[in-house]
Image (spheres, grey):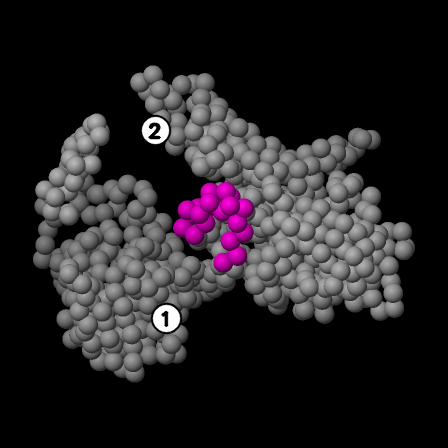
Amino acid sequence: MKIAVCVKQIPDPATPYALDPITHFVVRPAEQVLDDTDRYGIELGLQLAEASGGTVTLVSMSPVGNLQGIRQALAMGADKAVVVNDPALRGSGALVTARVLAAAIAREEADLVITGTESTDGYAGVVPQMIAELLDLPALTFARKVTLEGTTLKVERQTAGGYDEVEATLPALISVTSGAVEPRYPTFKGIMQAKQKPVDQPTAADLGLEPATVGAAGSGQVISEVRPAPERSGGVKIKDEGEAHLEIVKLLERAKVI
Amino acid sequence: MDFALSDEHQAFRRVVRSFAESEIAPHAARWDDEHHFPLDVVRAMGDLGLFGIPFPEEFGGGGADFLMFCIAVEEIARVDASLAITLEAAVGLGANPIHHFGTAEQKGRWLPDLLAGRALAAFALTEPDSGSDAGATRTKAVRDGDEWVIDGTKAFITNSGTAMTSLITVTARTPDGGISTIVVESGTPGLVIEPAYRKMAWRASDTHGVRFERCRVPRGNLLGEQGRGLHQFLSILDDGRIAIGAMSVGIASACLDHAVAYATHRSAFGRPIGANQGLAFQLADLQVAVEAARLLTYRAAWLRDQGRPFKQAAAQAKLFASETAVDAGRVATQVFGGAGVMEASPVARFYRDAKILEIGEGTSEIQRLVIARGLGLPV
């Protein structure tokens, strides 16, 4: 079985993000890290591949930089990576991202596509469904538990009130929630082997995509303005003279938390 | 000159740091308080490959350099000195002598489990009446047919008494008049492990007194050359000293980080206490010392990895880094004030854990002796 796992290199969340003042795009440093939430999809892919004797290919789209984030993912045990690397992709929106990833996945002839639910830098949260639509695959989103019996995928799909049990026959796409599996740490040998693993770096044209359909031009959207997030307001200070807990309960009730 | 770590060194540091912060740091204070050796976490460190880093792949090692091992030790020490010494001793004192002096058969028998972190080896050198003066070893080993018969008492032996301990290498005086090194496997009759010590430092590490009472092992358990045990041991110790330097750097930089964070957030007289030069300058000096200690340690590891002489460099690194760690513990505790003296405070634990770095694997006095003799002084 061929499993494609979508992963993303993002600027290190520990350092403040910078936006280009003119294009409003995120400034991407050469050293990007693996989006932490991608580790769940990689782990799921590895577990399914280990159980079925399959392979795991990472699929990504970004300026490659020093590939540090991709190597992190390879160190966990994935077999190879495809990173679509093309200046023409600059400014791509969610739909273009999905189009490019779908083209790369199609070229790999994957039986199963695994993604996270959303990236930690963009937070669009729509790319998995778009990929599924473009590849005409059933999309089993927000999976909190996944089992594969033969070619039948059974998924517990996280909902607001609990979970739904859904299933589909391969080929299919799953988006996994954080916590669905316990991601492994890369081993020392995994880290050393990661640098030897193949990283294919096709351009959009290599994937058969027309220039007009990718990048800012293909996105059909313009980021007209960006503003800093508003400062957090001061909140409410409660002085405890023995009754503070009641005040807190009231506040929580008002916020409909309890 | 190039001071940059390779991509692999950096990638590995990130993984070990993430493991240490997620799997060790949240529990370190409790393990310390309960004198608890966390077997499952030590095994997980084995799964990461930490115990095999500087050894050949042929026996399941990582085939990497000693600097890579130092980075692992440093990162574990940043959160928990007990687990750092567990790793350091298992590699530097446990597996290293077997790797250096074992026959092909001995290596094949013992190394794979040790390098995979499935088992731990201990090194029994120190005795109740001899530490730095290793030549005064009283433990005796005599030949009886195809066996060695060992009698004696050893003290402060790290990794000697857990369910993972598979063997103890013991130094003993042999009839040739010299000191020899002999491997005693766990469970051998006559090998008696005393109850674990109650320690001020490294409380979650596993340390016992060990007795050998008419303890018989096969003749083939002699490690290296008979009568050359002291010489062998001293060469092994140079490796260990670099690793203790790395541990010291980990503890010192953790103290610095905690102290800077506290000095930034804790206010007195209407401003952060770090706004006072009296305190800020102490932390500035500490950062310089930490960086110097790290450079000395990495340089010693680099010299070793290059196959160049590193005895002096190892002693310099161990001496300076361990004394820096103790300074760092003292300064950080001072910055924390009363909170720093509380057992729950991380700096209190680091302060206690730092002290023994000036003692184990060669006291500061022994390091100065090595360095002074390196200068040609008749000391």
| Circle 1 residue | A47
Q: Is residue B36 magenta?
A: yes
Left/right of residue A195 with respect to residue A225 in the rendered view: right
Placement of the N terminus of chain A among the 4 image quadrants: bottom left
Left/right of residue B361 with respect to residue B376 in the rendered view: left
SS of the residue at dot 2? helix
Nearer to the camera, B77 or A252: A252
Q: Which image quadrant for residue B94?
A: bottom right
Vertical arrangement, residue A212 with respect to residue A171, above or below: above
Q: Can residue B260 be seen from the camera position used here?
A: yes
- The image shows residue B145 at horizontal and vertical percentages of 88, 68
Count residues near mark 1 (Cα–Cα under 10 Å), then give few for <14, some for 14-19, many for 20+. some
Q: Chain of mark 1?
A: A
The structure residue drawn at horizontal position 21% and vertical position 52%, both measured from the top left corner, is A122
Count residues near mark 2 (Cα–Cα under 10 Å), then give few for <14, some for 14-19, many for 20+. few
Type of the residue with mark 1: Gln
Q: Chain of mark 2?
A: B
The structure residue drawn at horizontal position 48% and vertical position 29%, both measured from the top left corner, is B341
Considering every residue shown, the one lying at the far right of the view is B176
- The image shows residue B10 at horizontal and vertical percentages of 46, 50
Nearer to the camera, B135 or A131: B135
Q: Can residue B183 be seen from the camera position used here?
A: no
Vertical arrangement, residue A149 with respect to residue B4, above or below: below
Q: Is residue B266 magenta?
A: no
Nearer to the camera, A81 or B240: B240
Give the extent of the magenta segment: B20-40
Q: What distance separates the C-alpha of mark 1 from that of mark 2?
A: 44 Å
The structure residue drawn at horizontal position 60% and vertical position 43%, both measured from the top left corner, is B198
Residue B265: image tag: 2
SS of the residue at dot 1? helix
Considering every residue shown, the one lying at the far front of the view is A242
